[in-house]
Image: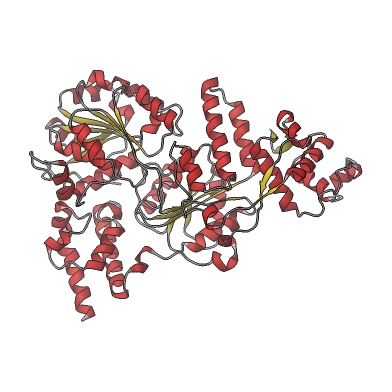
Amino acid sequence: MLLRPHRAESQAVPETATPLGVLRRVFGFPAFRGLQEAAITHLLDGGDALVLMPTGGGKSICYQVPALCRPGTALVVSPLIALMDDQVAALRQLGIAAGALHSEGDPEVQRTTARELEAGRLDLLYVSPERLLTPAMQERLGRRRLALIAIDEAHCVSQWGHEFRPEYRALACLPERFPGVPRVALTATADPRTRADILTALAMPRAETFLASFHRPNLHLAAAPKVGELAQLASVLRRHPAAAGIVYCASRAKTERVAASLAAQGLPAVAFHAGLPAEVKRAALARFRGGEPLVMVATIAFGMGIDRPDVRFVAHLDMPDSPEAYYQQIGRAGRDGERADTLLLYGGEDIARARHWLAQSAAPDAEKQAMGARLEAMIALTETTQCRTRSLLACFGETLAGGCGHCDNCAAPVATFDGTVEAQKVLSAILRTGQRFGAGHVVDVLRGEPSEAILRWSHDALPTFGVGRDRVSRFWHGVIRQLIALGVVDVELDGNFRTLRVDAARARPVLRGAERVALRVEEPRPAERPARRDRAAPAPAATLSPASGDLFEALRAWRAEEARAQAVPPYVIFHDSVLREIAALRPATHDQLGEIKGVGTSKRGRYGTAVLALVRQAQERAG
């Protein structure tokens, strides 16, 4: 994206600005939310801070407002170019002098940004940690007065985090290099251990922590065992026609395979992974950021730094390796506060593969133990029969009183049964076949299926042959998967061959009947039944009257044209929520438009005439 040079100096904020005045005049919000005001006050007093807020919770305000209230240029350390460019574009829309220095910027824009930094005309400068740590950049910044230093996506600092960037840990030099400059580290996902590591790694021992709730009521969480990935995914896509979404896969090959399958069905789907040619990735990213109803089938590398607010669903076709990674990825949906759906599909092979790679890791023992604990927490989250949101929040040390009411387990409570006998049958079949076969063969033994392999190995003569013929294959595969999740059964991976093995220590009390095994009853959920599957979730604009809905669409069309002309994502001009409120309230004057949340002074001046003209045209058509 080409970022055009901004104005010579910021006209957004007078020197005597107050935080609330900046919030109202520049950002167009009437009041602070949650812990924003407390964090801002702490920074304005010169203190360091760690801010943890969920995606969409307003973290950026916590450093952007004090950056505009304190003298000097605020330095923002950001991990991704896309994130920097989106933030800079959004700030310029607000009339704020912001710039970014990175390797992929237009050379003329980069030179202009450097000159304005030297002249002291930048309110905020975005840089990567790698660029910041160069002697030339530190020397350049050393000549300027810094208002504050913000370290965004601070979980990248931690070796316990899910997107570790080693360069971030070198940022511990900042207090020595820029003494007296307040620092704020911000992230949407960090469990207690990661939070402590962030503060240690950044040399912020006296920083105050501002911890908001991680609960996002607009996210509807669901998880299900894999019984046909593409069919299960199709049920989500049918509920969200003409909407944007992200589908995460564990491998590059799988992203391409799934994207091709969806495209063959006439769906606007593209693959995105690090191995694609740069021009292919740029084109896909431009389409996604440009507001198209696009399905991005991607590896987990995609999404951080993408601020598109109207992503209506996130689906995982493979299990993430930690609750932190899972929360970060589903957090890319529903940033506009409207309902968004998530679906996590998982299987015994996912669990086995994750445990296998962890066992093969060359990481230090302490790190492997931490990674193992996170992996087991993720496995427990997939199989939980309790409120899924409450289980997820518990991973971050947060307690939710009662069920959330917006997850699959709350919508359709999961029944359990005493599966001790069934578990004993599975364990016996694995042991009696010599722990040399995969799940399919073990299920054939239990079901009494005289397959070629069964007959060749004379497994039809085993006492366990046919003891489970009263149950369908899917039932036994579910029991095996749950035993894997419980750690009673393990899977040994040898290339494409997967062998079930019994964990003797954990299996012994089960086989003796000394330990009860509670298993979930796996019936199709209501949301998976055909009658419900084709029902589309109401579009956010459905709450508007027909006339207001027409105005909303007209405003969206105008915004799209304006975004194309400026080469910026549509959402940096106005979010859909702002356009929806304009369509509902129909302001007639610039002052009335300025009362809409999200319409600050700069945007009202830039777009007020065009927006009010569309409102007048709608009024005239209505008579």
Horizontal and vertical percent position of residue 572 = 27, 51
Give the residue at x 41% y 28%: 158
Q: Is residue 223 left or right of residue 542?
A: right
Residue lying at 41% horizontally and 59% vertically, measured from the top left: 293
Give the side of residue 187 with respect to residue 8, left or right: right
Kindly identify the residue that appears in the image at 30 percent across and 41 percent down. Answer: 59
Q: How is the image coloured?
A: secondary structure
Place of residue 583 in the rendered image (x, y in percent of width and height, measured from the top left): 25, 67
* Figure check: 199 above or below 234: above
Number of numbered discs visible in the structure rendering:
0
- Between 183 and 95, the residue placed more toward the observer is 183
Q: Quadrant of residue 488?
A: top right
Is 379 located above or below residue 242 in the figure? above
Residue closest to the far bottom: 623
Near-viewer residue (339 or 316): 339
Location of residue 432 in the rendering, given as x and y in whole percent from the top left corner: 84, 36
Q: Is residue 107 visible?
A: no
Q: Residue furthest top?
A: 176
The quadrant in which the C terminus is found is: bottom left
The image shows residue 522, relative to residue 361, as above or below, that is below
Let me know if residue 12 appears in the view. Answer: yes
Residue 570 x/y as whole percent:
29, 55
Pick whichever, 213 or 156, lies toward us.
213
